[in-house]
Image (cartoon, rainbow, N blue to C red):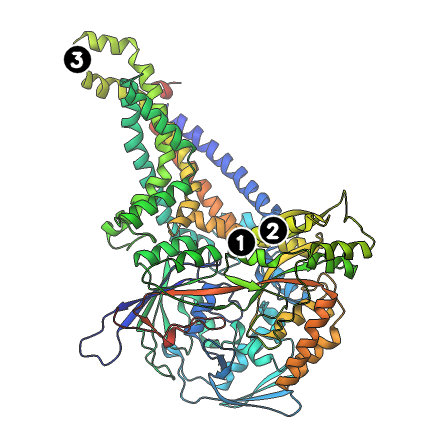
Amino acid sequence: MVITITACVQNPGSTTSPASVAQVLVSKDRDDFVTTDPALVSSNGDANVEQNVMDSLVRLKPGTNEVVPGLAETWDLTPDGLTYMFHLRKGVKWQKGFGDFTANDVVFSFNRIIDPKTASRYRNDFAPVKAVEAIDAYTVRITLKNRYPGFIGAVLTFRSGYIAKKEALEKFGTDYGRNAVGTGPFMLDSVTPGVGWTLVQNPEYWGPKPALQRIEYKLIKDEDVAVLALQKGELDVAYFEGPEAQVKVRGLKNVVILDRPMPRVYFTYINLQRPPFDNVKVRQALAWAINKQALVDHVFLGQGSVAQSMIPPGFIGHSDEAPYGYDLEKAKQLLAEAGYPGGFPGRTFQFVAIDVAPSPDILQVMQADWAKIGVQTKLEVLDIATLNARRMANTYDLLMIPFLRAESAQLIGPLLHSRSIPYENIEGYRGADDLIMRTESEVDSKKRSDLYLELNRVIQRDLPVIPLVYPIQVLAFKPSVKGAAIGLLNLPLWQMSVGAP
Amino acid sequence: MISRFLLGRFAQSIVTLIVAVTLIFLVVKLTPGDPVLVILQDHFQKETYDALAARLGLDQPLPVQFVRYVTNLLHGDFGTSFTSGQDVLRVVLEQFPYTFQLAIAAICVAIAIGVPAGLISAVCRNTWADYITMVTALISVCMPGFWLAILLLLVFSIQLGWTPIVGAGDPKDPASLLIHLVLPAFALGARTAALIARITRAAVLEVLHQDYVRTARAKGLAEAVILRRHVLRTALIPMLTVVGLEMGHVLGGSAIIEIVFSRPGIGRILVDALVARDYPQLQGALLFLTCLILIVNLVVDVLYSVADPRIRLA
């Protein structure tokens, strides 16, 4: 999603900093902004508005993975790691006259996601939760079924963790998306479907008043067009995910660039249920045959780094250990040891990926790499619906996808624990269940980190997945924009302002 | 005569609509991909999947879904979008004005360029003017619309700074709407202009050799008068057919132009709904466009019969 903030001059006598108008130029997703309903948010457009209009119990400090207070001033965790007690801020007002924020709002919001009738895609995130209860008007108790130290970072700071107001959902119904009600620093002012939407400052916000008075978003689906718009001055700030656009925007004059690793890893699933990929030596051969640096240099145009771990940099458990390099002879030797000297002549494996750039280019590079060791692949680039259907039907050998999550626990467990068979772990890996459970339940950060390192080694040994690249995210903005930062999964507009050019 | 003609065409349109409703329903439903999985992506348990499928009505057999679909249509209910939860018709009607503006502007551009170009080409047959016009028309037909759109953006919006890059303009400001329409309309209308130019050239050439035109010249009428009063009126009749046919292309082809210029519109709704397998939205938008094209063709037929008495009496 590309967001632009432009300046509007306030009243001459005002003591506030100049207000700005932000415009969203590019939406990386297919979707326009639709809703801030935490049970239903899906696109980047939804998430960016949600983060500025709504609030969560806790949030991530911009630019870091550190959890800081939000609607909860403090919280406690019992020694057994099973019960959180959140002590809520008092005096927080819902927007548009919907009264005071209380514990009942939290209970409603989370239980609604847990309710199967809501059919929320985030219900799985709350699977570890046993109960959400209001102890009093400003205290919420969340009881877990098992210890899950990643719960706060994984669930409560991300999309489903934002709190919704029951009365607002009931009043507006299917129109809630255009009448979003939160407790955040901004309010949704207007929505023009297919064009853009506007946020204005929330005068009753409980926290420090943002400098920005007004933010206008423009919906721009094409990042190249967004680069042009930034160049022409129709945008003040824009966020870029695609490597080509990132390179182009770096070449613009009079534009400031910030970048940081994205909480995303591009990796290849290997379908362990389809021979010969049930043979670990075959999988290891595939890993040795991929020139990951070429992917970074030529597909990502330098806008990324080689990945050896499923956990991106900045997350607990990230490892730089690199047991695999680019060695075709080693790959051929492993294939021979597996009983396939010369590879698989006359045989073609199905290699699928989503049709969003740069996935098709990644596939082509890997196809060429694997052909050198006698592994021929047939590439199929599919839209998301068809890709999901293929996954469910389990009719492929290899699958390359990008994966984005807020916390390490969400990156490994859902993909590689056997509990996710036959859904997210369709490929059927069962080799690290115990270790995964221990990483999810260890409350001591150092021990948890050590467990993740051990888990990394197991995954690298068994290779149910081959991590490929960590992409980066780029924020480009005019020099007049101050306080710009890239959050883990957000753009903290509430700390931005516009100064003199 | 006209009434019987119109009634006949109207009846044909109804039959076409019925077939279209059925085909749209089947083609959309039979497209590979599961909308429930698109919504849930990789976050789901079977319980959630089943609940969502039931809520969206996708757990019913196809014939049951079809009957419900048709029954709702007869009550004016196009359904609720899987993605946004909004009423499908409301979403389409909100964005239709943008597509309508673009389509009309593109057709106007096409006629404004195509007719004079075809006329010049025919009158100056086998001269440099003719050759240049026809080669330009050929290039325009072959040029991908999105390529032309990006080229126009680079030249007129970036290099020259004459036009904005994104958006549809302020709906309350006609000047803003117009300036935002110029490049998209040209990009979308270029191909149609080329077709009109070629059709007009062929039609004018045919008419120029008719006896009545020779008679008009023999009577001493000025060439300009002959062209305007006797030639163009006849030669433009085939152009009506082209406009009617091209309206479908313009409406459907608006999607890529809307994406390049970041304009809202039905084309974008169609693409987004297809990717998301948002069946109601996709069916609703397709049906709306179908009705629109049927109406346009009906109007073209009426205008055709007004312009050419031979059609009326046939």
Q: Nearer the viewer, residue A284 or A396?
A: A284
| Residue A445 can be seen, yes or no | yes
Location of mark 3 (residue): B221
Q: In x, y percent, where is residue A254?
A: 31, 62
Looking at the rendered structure, which numbered label has been put on residue A298?
A: 1
Location of mark 2 (residue): A365
What residue is at 69 percent from the left and 59 percent from the top?
A: A287
User: Separation of disc 3 and disc 2 at Cα?
Assistant: 71 Å
Looking at the rendered structure, which numbered label has been put on residue A475?
A: none
Q: Nearer the viewer, residue B257 or A399?
A: A399
Mark 1: which amino acid? His
**Callout 2: SS:** helix
Q: In x, y percent, where is residue A72?
A: 49, 86
Numbered disc 1: what chain?
Answer: A
Q: In x, y percent, where is residue B65?
A: 61, 51
Q: Is residue A373 above or below residue A151?
A: above
* Picture quarter with the C terminus of chain A: bottom left
Q: Nearer the viewer, residue A228 or B293?
A: A228
Q: Do the residues labelled 2 and 1 touch (CB within 8 Å)?
A: yes
Q: In this view, does A449 lie above or below A484?
A: below
Q: How crowded is mark 3: few (under 14 residues within 10 Å), some or many (20 or more)?
A: few
* Image-quadrant location for residue B220: top left
| Residue B299 can be seen, yes or no | no
Comparing labels 3 and 2, the label whose residue is closer to the camera: 2
What residue is at 57 percent from the left and 73 percent from the top?
A: A113
The first of marks 2 and 1 along the sequence is: 1
Numbered disc 3: what chain?
Answer: B
Q: Is residue B200 above or below residue A325?
A: above
User: Separation of disc 1 and disc 3 at Cα?
Assistant: 69 Å
